Image (cartoon, rainbow, N blue to C red):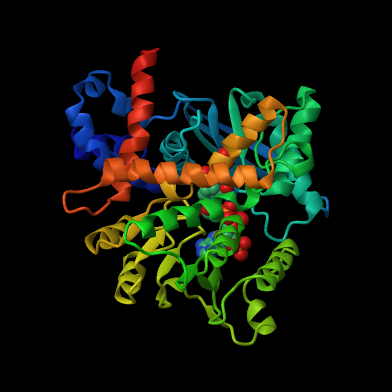
């Protein structure tokens, strides 16, 4: 297997799809040796087959705003690979959504879902619709319009969407409502549903909780814990607030959160009622992080900056892809940061990752560290299939155990001769082996 040759071919075939190409390159570089050691994979052309989505569905969404203006958005569902289970992955509503971003996310999801130990294939979907500034009725009409097309391609044993950026419990409710009306069946076709109609307890915070559990496992390998550590977090969506709550519970102090226009530094720690206050701001569709600095005067808002310039022990990027670059990585390492755990998907650029690995700090890539969200989705599907509800404690304990298992798999495949754990290689190899083997077992069709 020759990574450069494969990448050249992919670049020609997928021009301009930078995020997709970035995600593929990272995986190929990690698995090169194991593929070369397993000639049966090459003989079955597993690599060419795994980098190509099974199918991409693209469609138009037309909707009417509150003033009567008619809008058109583009929506997608990328069904990447269903070798180990039905397609599974979130829906993202954000103006940056493109075929490239959803192909990168769908590709990552294959390996992430494989790591969870649950039977889930990889998919992703979304639209370039921007929920910012839209009224609840506009959001509802958009979700309903989107579902009049998407329903044809999904199902509880076929493809099970969930949330992602811009898609939370409210949007899942509107999407599911329309699906149910068209299909005339009430089943677990979505995860992240409301608690009273099939949703799993703690799904909203599960990605953040899992991310912190993963960081905890990484820290343990060095005899460290979260207790007394300072934590820089980016974003303030589901993944960020879940991470902030769990990090605080485990004795750390969260000192930053951010939005696209800047970050908040709060030396007193962001926890308890401050998180409640931020969630209220978020619910009101506000300019969310800046007003925090008026409410809590010790906090400062840094316009146009990212939180990575703040001295911290642990960094949890939880916003969006490529939000932490080489300069940020150098600053974190210079300031003594010992652990970076990705709540977001691919938030660190390849150059930033290189700096973390060179400096041998603990670095947990998203497909391992943020797998707690989709794992809890898998648990929600299990409960739906059994028509049972587990308690919060039961769900969280299963989530914690899954994160420990994912960490163990990364150590198994990523430990280097000097004892350093390269979690990037570990996650990619562990995730790949299972899917590749399943593809081999099922033949070419
Ligand atoms: P949300 O929509 O709940 O939150 C996204 C957050 O990121 C918001 O605070 C948003 O700010 C902020 N943000 C968006 N763009 C930027 C930017 N350019 N710079 C700084 N902040 C930005 O999404 P989630 O929390 O669900 O998702 C966050 C990340 O976690 C994504 O990468 C997602 O793929 C990943 N993830 C999510 C999972 C889930 O279960 N939800 C599971 C695994 C990974 P604002 O609202 O002001 O725009
Ligand atoms: O990136 C992700 O793993 C998610 N957005 C969650 C996917 C899911 O199906 O729960």
Q: Is residue 88 visible?
A: yes
Residue at the far bottom in the pictured view = 297
Number of dots carrying numbers: 0
Name the one closer to the observer, 267 or 45.
267
Residue at coordinates 58% horizontally, 49% vertically from top-left? 206
Quadrant of the image containing the N terminus: top left
Residue at 66% x, 83% y is: 296
169 over 383 or under it: above or below: below
Vertical comparison of 32 with 445: above or below: below
Q: Quadrant of ligand 2?
A: top right
The image quarter containing residue 352 is bottom left
Residue at x 37% of width, y 28% of height: 434
- Residue 351 in percent (x, y) is at 29, 59
Q: Is residue 107 left or right of residue 35?
A: right
Q: Nearer the viewer, residue 333 or 443?
A: 333
Q: For this rendering, which residue is in front, 103 or 1?
A: 1
Does residue 70 show up? Answer: no
Position in image of residue 197 (x %, y %): 78, 37
Q: Residue at x 78, y 26 (%)?
A: 182
């Amino acid at each position: 297997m020759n990574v450069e040759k494969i990448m050249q071919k992919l670049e020609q075939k997928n021009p301009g799809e930078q995020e997709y190409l970035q995600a593929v390159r990272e995986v190929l570089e990690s698995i090169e040796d194991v593929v070369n050691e397993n000639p049966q994979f090459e003989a079955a052309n597993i690599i060419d087959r795994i980098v190509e989505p099974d199918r991409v569905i693209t469609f138009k969404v037309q909707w009417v705003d509150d003033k009567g203006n008619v809008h058109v958005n583009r929506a997608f569902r990328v069904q990447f690979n269903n070798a180990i289970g039905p397609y599974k992955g979130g829906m993202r509503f954000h103006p940056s959504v493109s075929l490239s971003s959803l192909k990168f996310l769908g590709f990552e999801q294959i390996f992430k879902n494989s790591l969870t130990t649950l039977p889930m294939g990889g998919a992703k979907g979304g639209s370039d619709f921007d929920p910012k500034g839209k009224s609840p009725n506009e959001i509802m009409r958009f979700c309903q319009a989107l579902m009049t097309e998407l329903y044809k391609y999904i199902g509880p044993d076929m493809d099970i969407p969930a949330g992602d950026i811009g898609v939370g419990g409210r949007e899942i409710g509107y999407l599911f409502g329309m699906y149910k009306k068209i299909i005339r069946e009430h089943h677990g076709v979505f995860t992240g549903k409301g608690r009273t109609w099939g949703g799993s307890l703690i799904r909203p915070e599960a990605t953040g909780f899992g991310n912190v559990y993963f960081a905890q496992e990484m820290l343990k390998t060095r005899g460290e814990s979260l207790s007394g550590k300072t934590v820089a977090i980016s974003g303030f969506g589901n993944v960020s607030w879940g991470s902030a709550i769990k990090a605080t519970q485990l004795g750390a102090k969260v000192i930053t959160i951010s939005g696209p226009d800047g970050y908040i530094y709060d030396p007193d720690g962001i926890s308890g009622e401050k998180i409640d206050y931020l969630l209220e701001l978020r619910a009101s569709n506000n300019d969310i992080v800046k007003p925090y600095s008026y409410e809590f005067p010790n906090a400062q808002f840094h316009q146009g900056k990212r939180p990575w310039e703040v001295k911290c022990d642990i960094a949890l990027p939880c916003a969006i892809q490529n939000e932490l670059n080489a300069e940020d990585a150098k600053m974190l390492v210079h300031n003594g940061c010992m652990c970076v755990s990705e709540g977001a998907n691919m938030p660190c650029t390849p150059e930033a990752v290189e700096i973390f690995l060179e400096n041998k700090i603990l670095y947990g890539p998203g497909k391992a560290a943020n797998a707690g969200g989709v794992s809890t989705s898998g648990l929600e599907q299990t409960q739906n299939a059994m028509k049972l509800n587990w308690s919060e404690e039961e769900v969280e304990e299963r989530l914690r155990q899954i994160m420990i298992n994912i960490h163990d798999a990364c150590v198994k495949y990523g430990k280097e001769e000097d004892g350093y754990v390269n979690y990037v290689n570990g996650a990619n190899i562990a995730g790949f082996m299972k899917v590749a083997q399943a593809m081999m077992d099922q033949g070419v069709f």
